[in-house]
Amino acid sequence: MTKIKQKWKKDLDLLSSKQSAKYDDSLEVIGLMRQGMSLNQASKLVGISPSTVKRYVGTTLKLKNKRIIARKNDSLLRKIRIYENGKEEFIQIRGRKNSAIVAQYLGAVGRRIDKNDTTALESFEKITIRDFKGNHHRFETDIKKLIRLFEKREEPEFFKIYRGR
């Protein structure tokens, strides 16, 4: 692989939409492998070849007892949504641990809005997360701003495929 082709490892925005889909599928395979599946089983379930997984996330795979397994932690890039300063932002973060923190935050946002859990966002008030460029991002915890964000979202349109008889 040439250096030009590997630049995407430093910025996922350099991937084409097709490559981005393969990268996301490869991350899904890694997740399934961490739950106990083999590379071949997980690849088959996701619908991607093991060689494609190795091409995109091979640094996360290791050989243990003659079997390919996924490392517990990684430094792979992930493009993920956060809420910051009253806006929805998409940032790229490095590593499984950081993505787990953002996932916990998004879960807390859901609990705060859907279940009115007033304490859900308290633990995220002072947490910052660093993106792949080194910029620090602070999680939005103001419920009024979050509700405004959710109200602005457009609802997906539903199309009737089959006519009732």
Image: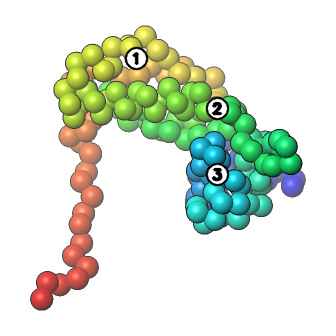
- The circle on residue 124 is 1
Is 19 on the left or on the right of 115, as rendered?
Answer: right
Q: The C terminus is located in which quarter?
A: bottom left
Can see residue 165?
yes
For the residues labelled 3 and 1, the Cα–Cα distance comes to 33 Å
In the picture shown, does residue 40 fall above or below 72?
Answer: below
User: How many neighbours does mark 1 have within 10 angstroms: few (below 14), some (14-19), or many (20 or more)?
Assistant: some
- The circle on residue 95 is 2
Q: Looking at the image, do the residues carrying marks 2 and 1 touch, with CB atoms under 8 Å apart?
A: no
Q: Amino acid at mark 2?
A: Gly
Q: The N terminus is located in which quarter?
A: bottom right
Q: At 55% across and 41% down in the image, what residue appears? A: 79
Where residue 121 sits, quadrant-wise, is top left
Q: Earlier in the sequence, mark 3 or mark 1?
A: 3
Is 138 on the left or on the right of 85, as rendered?
Answer: right
Where residue 71 sits, quadrant-wise, is top right
Is 157 on the left or on the right of 125, as rendered?
Answer: left
For the residues labelled 2 and 1, the Cα–Cα distance comes to 19 Å
Q: Amino acid at mark 3?
A: Met
Measured as percent of width and height from the top left, residue 137 is found at 49, 22
Can see residue 85?
no
Measured as percent of width and height from the top left, residue 86 is found at 32, 27
Observer-side mark, 3 or 1, equals 3
Disc 1 is placed on an element classified as helix
Q: Residue most toward the front?
A: 65
Is 132 on the left or on the right of 50, as rendered?
Answer: left
Disc 3 is placed on an element classified as loop
Q: Residue most toward the bottom?
A: 165
Residue linked to disc 3: 37
Measured as percent of width and height from the top left, residue 46 is found at 58, 61
Q: Earlier in the sequence, mark 2 or mark 1?
A: 2
Q: Amino acid at mark 1?
A: Phe
